[in-house]
Image (cartoon, coloured by chain):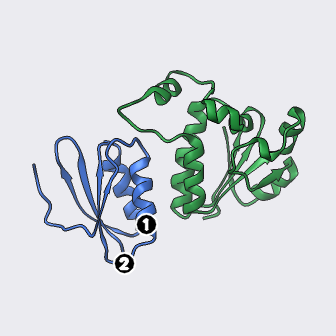
């Protein structure tokens, strides 16, 4: 299991949810958060790997890391 | 971004779900959305229909209703979430309601108002229209 060098302030467990559930979970949490906060989005939905980074870029947040845990992914995002 | 005006005229579950997914992510991403539910697209929001999940649809719709491994929120839930997260308004077609002798109370609590065609066209003036 690979680890990330980043430590999340908020962990969002969206494992089991289909597209666009994980992305919506992230958007919902990140909206009300303070700038600089780091989120770890856990997802089993493979389309999140592409979809979330795309949204993050468009929304001007920062994609820190994507960690593959074999049975799920952790996507680390910093709110700008 | 002026956003999208979506005419939702189909009651098929896979189309309702596709609209809900795309429109909710859009609304949560600061893209304004107006949905005009009309014809069978409005009937899918009937309280009894939603309660009993008696929707029409093809194989993907069936798989969504039966899926245990992947949780897929029903379009009504996604609509509710979109309203919380963004500029997302939903309107019910007056003609469809009149034909069936219904009022907004017969539908799940997601609608901003009742609207006729000219009202919708005015609302859609600055938007790209998507017809489903």
Q: Which chain is blue?
A: A
Give the image location of residue B83, x and y in percent.
60, 58
The residue lying at 24 percent from left, 49 percent from top is A73
The residue lying at 72 percent from left, 61 percent from top is B126
Label 1 lies in what chain? A
Give the image location of residue A36, x and y in percent.
31, 77
Whole-number angstrom distance, CA of label 2 to CA of label 1:
13 Å
- Camera-side residue of B74 and A51: B74
Q: Which SS class for mark 2? A: loop
Q: Which SS class for mark 1? A: loop
Task: Quickly name the residue at label 1.
Answer: A59
Q: Would you say residue B33 is visible in this rendering?
A: yes
In the picture, measured across the screen, residue A11 lies left or right of residue B23, that is left
Q: Residue furthest bottom?
A: A35
The residue lying at 17 percent from left, 47 percent from top is A69
Give the image location of residue B72, x and y in percent.
46, 39
What hue represents chain B? green
The disc placed on residue A35 is 2
The disc placed on residue A70 is none
Give the image location of residue B40, x and y in percent.
74, 32
């Amino acid at each position: 299991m690979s680890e990330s060098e980043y430590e999340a302030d908020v962990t969002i467990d969206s494992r089991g949810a289909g597209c666009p559930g994980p992305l919506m979970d992230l958007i919902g949490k990140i909206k009300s958060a303070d700038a600089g906060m780091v989120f770890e989005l856990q997802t089993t939905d493979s389309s999140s790997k592409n979809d979330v980074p795309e949204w993050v870029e468009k929304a001007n947040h920062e994609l820190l890391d994507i960690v593959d845990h074999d049975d799920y992914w952790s996507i680390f995002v910093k709110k700008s | 971004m002026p956003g999208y005006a979506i005419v939702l005229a189909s009651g098929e579950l896979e189309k309702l779900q596709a609209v809900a997914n795309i429109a909710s992510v859009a609304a949560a991403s600061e893209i304004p959305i107006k949905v005009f539910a009309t014809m069978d697209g409005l009937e899918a929001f009937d309280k009894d229909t939603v309660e009993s999940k008696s929707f029409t649809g093809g194989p993907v719709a069936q798989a969504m209703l039966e899926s245990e491994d992947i949780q897929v929120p029903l379009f009504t839930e996604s609509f509710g979430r979109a309203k919380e997260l963004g500029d997302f308004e939903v309107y019910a077609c007056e003609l469809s309601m009149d034909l069936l002798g219904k009022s907004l109370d017969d539908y799940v609590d997601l609608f901003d108002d009742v609207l006729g065609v000219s009202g919708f066209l005015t609302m859609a003036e600055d938007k790209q229209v998507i017809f489903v």
